[in-house]
Amino acid sequence: MSEQDPEQSAAGSLMSHLVELRDRVVRMVLSVLVIFLALFYWANDIYIYLAEPLTRHLPEGANMIAIDVASPFLTPFKLVLMLAVFLSMPVILYQCWSFVAPGLYANEKRLAGPLLVSSILLFYAGVAFAYYVVFPLVFGFFTRIGPEIVNISTDIGRYLDFVLALFFGFGLAFEVPIATIILVAIGFTTPKKLADKRPFVIVGAFIIGMLLTPPDVISQVLLAFPMWILFEGGLIASKIIFRDRNFDEDEDDEDDEDDDDEAEVETSPVVAGHEPLTDAEMEAELDQAEGDESSLDKQ
């Protein structure tokens, strides 16, 4: 009976974790559902507000169109659902945090809490930057650059997909400081090493801007530059947060290890000018050693 007690306790612990996970997932879904039901009545008004950066630059008399039969209903429905998830993100992340927090150490909890709040605020800041800064520039450029004989009539579904991609890209890009702080926190790198890799970071920011944004230069550049600035902010924040760590000593220790490795290489027989023995020389050495042993045995 005693041999089964550990198994029973492990099974009970697993079931309790699964029950807790189920309860927290239900709370996440309920938060999204409540916000969705509260906003669904104003779905068309919300879509009009979202489309305002484009409709402001449309020629006089031009309107948006719906290609699919169900688009006038499904597109605002999709928008409100995504908005409900977006507004429920603090609740969703809090439930995730509450589930994993008991397994964290005290110092990890002190760091994870502020990072969680900062990540939410930075994501919202990225979305706001896209709507209020990027959209007017991008749509103003697109509506002016086309030929005069072309009537601009954007489909409401494709417009929603376009802006959601930009929202996701800019919200994700604004998490760069959090990623920088986490890399330094886990000891993967140091602020000085990240600063030395600044040229690669800048190139990577433009590559990420190319992948996360639609194929236009304006949105790519407007995403790359904030990523670079936020990377610099992450470096400064990591130096302040982890000011108790002596990064210089760690780097000096690594340099000393490199110097020791180089010294070992320099003192190796091959590098010092001593070539390895040939097969004949090796056999001669072995014969001489055997002869010395036999003479000692006779004595």
Image (cartoon, grey):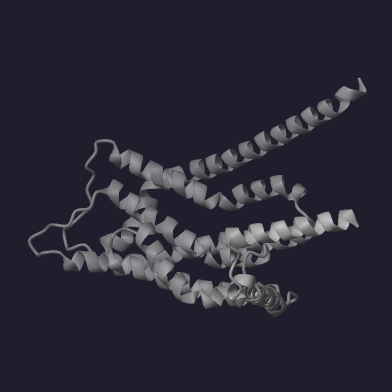
Place of residue 241 in the rendered image (x, y in percent of width and height, measured from the top left): 69, 73
Please tell me whether residue 117 is drawn above or below residue 241 in the rendered image. above
Place of residue 117 in the rendered image (x, y in percent of width and height, measured from the top left): 63, 61
Place of residue 220 in the rendered image (x, y in percent of width and height, measured from the top left): 35, 66
Please tell me whether residue 123 is drawn above or below residue 157 in the rendered image. below
Please tell me whether residue 86 is drawn above or below residue 200 in the rendered image. above
Q: What is the tally of numbered marks visible in this picture?
A: 0
Place of residue 292 in the rendered image (x, y in percent of width and height, measured from the top left): 80, 60
Q: Is residue 119 left or right of residue 126?
A: right
Q: Quadrant of residue 288?
A: bottom right
Q: Residue at x 88, y 54 (%)?
A: 298
The N terminus appears in which quarter of the rendering? Answer: top right
Q: Nearer the viewer, residue 192 or 220?
A: 192
Q: Residue at x 21, y 54 (%)?
A: 63
Q: Residue at x 34, y 50 (%)?
A: 161
**Residue located farthest toward the top when viewing the structure as drawn:** 1
The C terminus appears in which quarter of the rendering? Answer: bottom right
Residue 293 appears in the rendering: yes
